[in-house]
Image: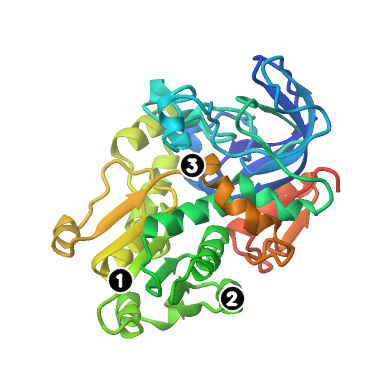
Amino acid sequence: MKAVTWHGKRDVRVDTVEDPKLREPTDAIIRVTSTGICGSDLHLYEVLGAFMDEGDILGHEPMGIVEEVGTGVTNLKPGDRVVVPFNISCGHCFMCDRGLQSQCETTQVKERGKGAALLGYTKLYGQVPGGQAEFLRVPQAHYGPIKVPDGPPDERFVYLSDVVPTAWQAVEYANIPEGGSVVVFGLGPIGQMSARIAKHRGAGKVIGVDLVPERLALAATYGVTVLDTREHRDIADAIHQVTDGRGADSVIDAVGMEAHGAPLSKLTQDLVNLLPQAVAAKLTEKAGVDRLSVLYAAIDSVRRGGTISLSGVYGGMVDPLPMMDLFDKQIQLRMGQANVRHWIDDIMPLISDPKDPLGVEGFATHKLPLKEAPHAYEMFQQKQDGAIKILLQPGL
């Protein structure tokens, strides 16, 4: 089969690899019909190469048609149409029972001290072959895959794999008061969807912050008050001005470890990537740093007693945080990988609604065949051609 594989920093290719096979009774094989490129994939493209091996298959936002199931999978059959959550969870352990599927004790990568295994996402999270491929082996298929009806286009459902549950959790964790204000830093796919969900769930003022004109324009069409960081020397001050001088009730950081405006941290990340892989991996695990400009801005922008929700991926181990400000302002901070399965029952009515209140149909700015993945990654990473969300479709 054809699959998108990692070969080094900013080097992804479409290779011919072995077709996946059932390994465990709880496995399934699906034929992938659509699969997204996520902002988290760009971290692998740029700064997390120390935890990748050449030839690793990328991707964690797939959906498709079931081809084969193991003997332990009784809820699926060949021909079923499914979306596959990016975190691999069993559905019956201590953590899954508490709605913390991203911490699943059955699939935890204990040798790395990490939570549940993830599709297509580094040695830290199990090095499980990902979904940017023609076919995918789905572990824990007795629980993970979400059956969806035939008929509507893939784009109606594919974002159940990551984007919509991640954004839903970001809003849930932000604890926005009814009619209150929320700032969303970063208007990529997760930020766009977070802003829409916040509006849908009753936020009175949603403020979106970015520096890419196409992203700002798209958010504005959904009633978001947009702020362009290029036009404000102090973005926190600008946010205070539109929130009665006290700051936002809630802030969502949908950017993470590669934020703009942190040149020294970027230089550190770049230098680490020049080291031999084993050395770089150990240094990142023990002394890695993130670009924290957005998190600092979030702390400055939230009101006293407010809440910050982190959905952007962070990976630093020695990040300096302004603990005095966090403590003095009595800020609540919530974060973590999305517990995809936990939110599906809340989300599915909106995704299935013919009125499409979250605007999932048309959310992708680009739909490309799998063979164009190298170009798609470059375009997404460089923010070219108005790329906000890219779907790869092996059948094109």
In the image: residue 386, left or right of residue 311? right
In the image: residue 214, left or right of residue 174? right
9 in relation to 31, above or below: below
Whichever of labels 1 and 3 marks the residue nearer the N terminus, that label is 1
The local crowd at label 1, few if under 14, some if 14 to 19, many if 20 or more residues have their Cα within 10 Å, is many
The one nearer the camera, 45 or 169, is 169
**Which marked residue is nearer to the observer: mark 2 or mark 1?**
2
Write down the residue under mark 1: 301
Residue 53: x and y in percent read 56, 28
**Which marked residue is nearer to the observer: mark 1 or mark 3?**
3
Q: Secondary structure at mark 2?
A: loop
Give the residue type that dot 2 points to: Tyr
Q: Are marks 3 and 2 in contact (CB under 8 Å)?
A: no
Q: Secondary structure at mark 3?
A: loop
The local crowd at label 2, few if under 14, some if 14 to 19, many if 20 or more residues have their Cα within 10 Å, is some
Residue 282: x and y in percent read 35, 30
